[in-house]
Image (cartoon, rainbow, N blue to C red):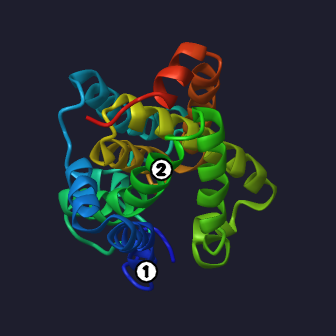
Amino acid sequence: MRAGAGWPTHLPGLAGPAVAAVLVTAILDGRRGLCDLGLRAVRWRVGWRWWVVVAATFGLAALGAVQALVTGDDVPSLADFTRYTGVGSISPVGVVVMVLIVNGLGEETGWRGFAVERLIREHDLRWTALLVGVGWAGWHLPFFWLVDTFRSFGPLALGWFVSMLAASVVLAHMYCAGRHSVLLVAAWHTAFNFTSATEATGAVVGTVMSVAVISWAIWVLRRPDLVHEASSSVDS
């Protein structure tokens, strides 16, 4: 599977965590649990600062154009910034919406909306993020045989694993501090992917984003007040 190619595609598989979360929630908690999960999936009142973070992350995709200017390459077009693996030639807005629904909500409903939501009740942020991060990374393993960009990682796969654990810390904290909004973490996840995993941004910008996320995770883990706040947060 390659960027800009609509077939073959891995997008249906990205909804797996959401499907699993819905099924297990229905079995364990019934209609009440499903209603709660649904409300968290569309919760947008999380404070304007978090939406600024999402917008700023999206904006960092412009580094792809800066990189092209520095290296003397052709400046990427808008279509290049939305040339996404597994998505065919549709409008840029259509690509973003599709990725938000399938990739963002598809993954985050399961990993943060279900797994973090339940683990954080009895464990602190560090343990929760580590456990979910290992599972999240392991779930991506088939991509190393299926997705062109993953196949090209080579030894850099170790750095990818570290960045996944760091992203798990960032997303777990964002989820808890953002009133347990699945929509918020899905939007940020989508923004990060467009910043680091499109044809226009490439490996250099992706590496910059990974370093930024690792730094963000270290900042969260070195702040006991943030760890305690996230671990003791109550959905409201």
Three-letter amino acid code of the residue under disc 1: Thr
Q: Quadrant of residue 215?
A: top right
Q: Quadrant of residue 227?
A: top right
Three-letter amino acid code of the residue under disc 2: Arg
Q: Which residue is mark 1?
A: 9
Name the quarter where the C terminus is drawn. top left
Q: Are marks 2 and 1 in contact (CB under 8 Å)?
A: no
Q: Nearer the viewer, residue 112 or 72?
A: 112
Q: Which residue is mark 2?
A: 118
Q: Which mark is residue 126?
A: none
Q: Nearer the viewer, residue 109 or 54?
A: 109
Secondary structure, mark 2, is: helix
In front of the other: label 2 or label 1?
Answer: 2
- The answer to whether 177 is drawn above or below residue 148 in the figure is above
Residue 60 visible to the viewer: no
Residue 138 visible to the viewer: yes
Answer left or right for 34 relative to 107: left
Q: Residue furthest right?
A: 155
Crowding around mark 2 (Cα neighbors within 10 Å: few <14, some 14 to 19, many 20+) is few
